[in-house]
Image: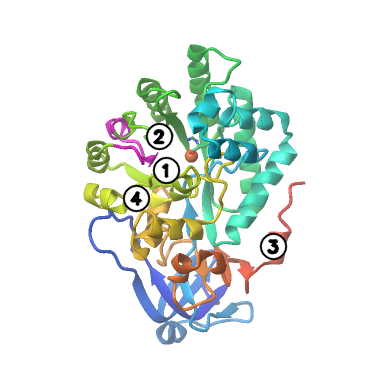
Amino acid sequence: MKHPDLLLFHGRLLTPPAEAVALGQPLSLEETADGAVVAHRGKIVDVGPTAEVLERTTAGPMTRMIDAQGRAVLPGLVDPHTHMLYAKDRMDEMELRHEGKGYLEILAAGGGILKSMRDFRAADDQELAEGLLSRLKQAVGQGTVAVEVKTGYGLSQAEEMRGLGIIDRVAKLTGLPITPTLLAAHAFPPDTGRAEYLDQCDRTATQAAKAGLAKAVDVFVEDGVFSPAEGRRLLAHARTLGLAARMHADELSPSGGAELAAELAAVSADHLTAATAEGLAQMAAAGVSAVVLPGTSFFLDRPPLMAARVREARLIAALATDSNPGSSPFVSMAWMIALAFHRNRFTWPEALTMATINAAHVLGRDRELGSLTVGKRCSLLVLDEADPRVLVYRPDQAAPWAVVESGRVLIWQGAPTEEVMAWTVS
Ligand code: NIG
Ligand code: FE
């Protein structure tokens, strides 16, 4: 390398370790008070105190120089659980819940996920791609550099495959590291018998794996939705295809989801607000990560998964938005970090670790994302302040000063750059 592509200096660098960490011991971020990061071909090639890095680096005429002027520089945020591919909002349902109707009661009456299924099926590819793209732009504007996107509103083989195709199209047009997950088992569609739909989920997983369009299979295991036995069958099949197993587990009632995730050595079990202590301990022993979704507990007004329970089980825990029209219509990981601190009682270094390296671990991307480490993608969140606790203190006023994704500057001085403005579905 003669001249690097990017040199960011005079930043207050804060990073979690290069590998995922189990909670339970006191955590702190490693700080370099006046630090620099050098990127070439999208990757970090040097990082350290500004004075030392400048001595080792020869900037050329094409090197982009960014003087961070003491601002906090963190690894870009990673969102490992979203349902961002959907057609319409569900604001009416939000009001029904206020009047006392339950989330599963609304679903059983043909609303909820099934309302989103009808909206999805009625929408064309263009509309769906535009919706996903606009949510991604918003997320990037809040410091997110990588996301997982699930299907789950098509609920037939053809419609779920259509969803995966749209996710792939948007991943290609943005160049963002998007991890696609097949969630055909999100609800039973009213137009298909139960046994037939389970077979269809397996066939869809096979087709998706062959086409290289999914990295994982997820199942909504919950009383009244998919049983643990059904989850076991679908995820065992996914594993034979080389796909990662993920699970919506114990979100509303203790349904044996955490225990099943442990038995299957799933990559993650997500939600877990109603999980048993025994189930959480089994997950940790089996190396299953926990994905904490504070936006959902907030929006459905349910007790959050408290930090003490996660620490006691010594789980590798990550944070995600669960971005979806029904239970968490949010895209901001900063907002999740704040909720995780205030409601779940994680410390802010824990919350940041959960939103970076541990989130990357859930996506199988811990060697490429989640910390300021040589060899990883140069994906950075530069806050407009020196103190990173603004994310927790006033998340509504913590919009990034800059966001860098694999060496590309996507947000600059608080605004999307021309590159981001040019992302369109054509
Ligand atoms: O993670 N629980 C199941 N799935 C989503 C909600 C999806 C929806 O309501 O549309 C969740 O909360
Ligand atoms: Fe979810």
Q: Residue furthest front?
A: 99
Mark closest to the chain's N terminus, 4 or 3: 4
Which label belongs to residue 190? none
Residue that carries the numbered disc 3 in the rendered image:
419
Residue segment shown in magenta: 259-275
Label 3 neighbourhood size at 10 Å, few (<14), some (14-19), many (20+)?
A: few
Q: In the image, what residue type sits under mark 2?
A: Leu
Say whether marks 3 and 1 touch (CB < 8 Å).
no
Residue that carries the numbered disc 1 in the rendered image:
302
Residue that carries the numbered disc 2 in the rendered image:
252
- Asked if 264 appears above or below 280 in the picture, the reply is above
SS class of the residue under badge 4? strand
Residue 14 appears left or right of 299: left
- Asked if 304 appears above or below 156 in the picture, the reply is below
SS class of the residue under badge 1? loop
Q: Nearer the viewer, mark 4 or mark 1?
A: 1
Q: CA distance from mark 4 to mark 2?
A: 19 Å
Residue 173 percent location from the top left of the image:
67, 50
Residue that carries the numbered disc 4 in the rendered image:
317
Q: CA distance from mark 4 to mark 1?
A: 19 Å
Q: CA distance from mark 3 to mark 1?
A: 40 Å
SS class of the residue under badge 2? loop
Quadrant of the rendered structure where residue 98 is? top right
SS class of the residue under badge 3? helix
